[in-house]
Amino acid sequence: MPSNSPSSVPSSDDLVTSHIPLVGHLVRETLARVPGHVDRDDLTSAGLAALVLAARAYEPERGVPFARYASTRVRGALLDELRSVDWATRAVRRRARDLDETRTRLTHSLGRVPTDAEVASALGLPLEEVVANREDLARAQVLSLEAGDEHGSYAESLASASLTPERALEHQELLGYLGEAIAELPERLRRVVEGYFLDEQPMAELAAELGVTESRVSQLRAEAMVLLRDGINSQLDPHLVPQHERPGGVAARRRESYFAAVAERHAAALRPVRHRVATSA
């Protein structure tokens, strides 16, 4: 690995140039989870601006790989961009937060992601209302913030940009699932993810370590990203997991085993927390 001596530290321009693909990856990851109307170019522009700022502010002596540092900054910028076009009324967002909080609580108590019917029952709501709320969010339309109607400006209906306790909890849960999903990856895929994204190893170095071509490392990285995405979604948003093209095949069974392993690792991580809560009650 390169040292952090002044002569070996890349310039901010070099950091930006070499990490432009990271912005593209994070934009694609974001687009997979938002309504289709969200503009790719707007997200990319926000992500690149954040990358430039991250490169200027980066302090290599802190020992944090630039890819990890920049990813945090870029994800934050993408979230801010999404918030800037968020149309949903306070009532819709308030109901969504109630549903998310209940879904998180049930996930912890059941050890799996609850169904819409279970969430509706826990809140004493009709199932149709739970489904309708999700559809309302999915039908988001980008409206002018300056426009208004008899109810006032649309800007007044935007969700708060501050992170609510519920959202903070969801963020922590997502990070937990990410770590668990990485840990359960097949060994070679895990090594590629850790090397490329966490240790910031060059593609050529990873290829030499694994005894494959750089093209193959790129394929393994793409395969790992899909598996990670589906592994996390299988626990948090099952409806986002696409059906396998051969549901009864070997690859599909391996994928299901991976999903189950992620769920079990998460449940195991929660057991000490539940024990402490139970003993302190």
Image (cartoon, helix red, strand yellow):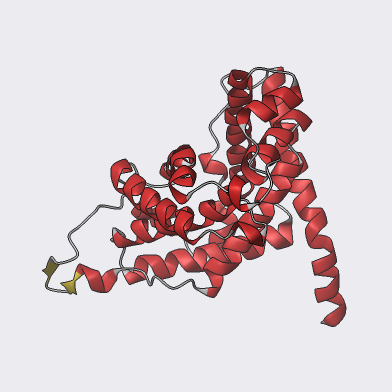
Q: Is residue 42 above or below residue 230?
A: below
The residue positioned 85% from the left and 65% from the top of the image is 272
Residue 100, given in percent of the width and then of the height, sits at 53, 62
Residue 119, given in percent of the width and then of the height, sits at 57, 60
Q: Is residue 245 above or below residue 168?
A: above
Depth check, front residue: 93 or 22: 22
- Is residue 86 found left or right of 170 in the rendered image? left
The residue positioned 47% from the left and 54% from the top of the image is 55
- Using the rendered image of the protein, determine whether residue 134 is visible from the camera's viewpoint: no
Residue 2, given in percent of the width and then of the height, sits at 68, 42
- Using the rendered image of the protein, determine whether residue 86 is visible from the camera's viewpoint: yes
Q: Is residue 230 above or below residue 247?
A: below
Classify residue 132 by image quadrant: bottom left
Tell me the quarter of the image containing the N terminus. Answer: top right
Q: Residue furthest front?
A: 7
The residue positioned 53% from the left and 58% from the top of the image is 58
Residue 106, given in percent of the width and then of the height, sits at 65, 61
Tell me the quarter of the image containing the C terminus. Answer: bottom right
Depth check, front residue: 248 or 16: 16
The residue positioned 64% from the left and 65% from the top of the image is 105
Q: How many marks?
A: 0
Q: Is residue 104 above or below residue 134?
A: below
Depth check, front residue: 91 or 224: 224
- Is residue 44 found left or right of 222 in the rendered image? left
- Is residue 105 found left or right of 39 in the rendered image? right
